[in-house]
Image (cartoon, rainbow, N blue to C red):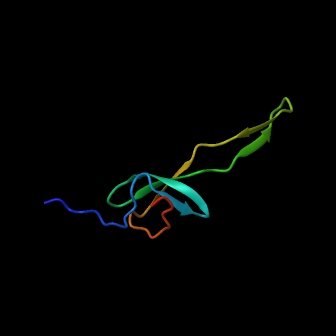
Amino acid sequence: MTSQPHPFRLRAGDLIEMDGKPCPIVRVTESAAVVAVAQPWREFTTLAGKRVQLQPAPKLVRISANSECPILNR
């Protein structure tokens, strides 16, 4: 017997809103969903005096797979 997933459960590929920003769901297990949260640009000046901006890799955050957060792409 196969069980039907809950229709409002988060799925991989969903786009949700966290802290006012859209964040994609990377993967979902029975107990947690992994969300990629973009980090802000970092700006600094090198020893040579040149200004450089870097975008760090997204931070992976785990939330409940059944959490009630707004889904933006469904």
Residue at the extreme right:
49
- Is 16 situated above or below 56? below
Residue closer to the observer: 61 or 20: 20
Name the residue at 48% across, 58% down.
Answer: 73
Residue at the extreme front:
74
Give the position of the N terminus as an image quadrant: bottom left
Estimate the x, y position of residue 23 in percent, counting from the top left. 54, 55
- Is 50 situated above or below 22? above
Estimate the x, y position of residue 44 in percent, counting from the top left. 78, 41
Name the residue at 37% across, 64% down.
Answer: 9
Residue at the extreme left:
1
Q: Is residue 31 left or right of residue 21?
A: left
Q: Is residue 71 left or right of residue 51?
A: left
Estimate the x, y position of residue 30 in percent, counting from the top left. 32, 59
Name the residue at 39% across, 59% down.
Answer: 32
Q: Is residue 43 left or right of residue 64?
A: right
Residue at the extreme top:
48
Give the mark count: 0
Estimate the x, y position of residue 40 in percent, counting from the top left. 67, 50
- Is 55 situated above or below 31? above
Give the position of the C terminus as an image quadrant: bottom left
Residue closer to the observer: 72 or 42: 72
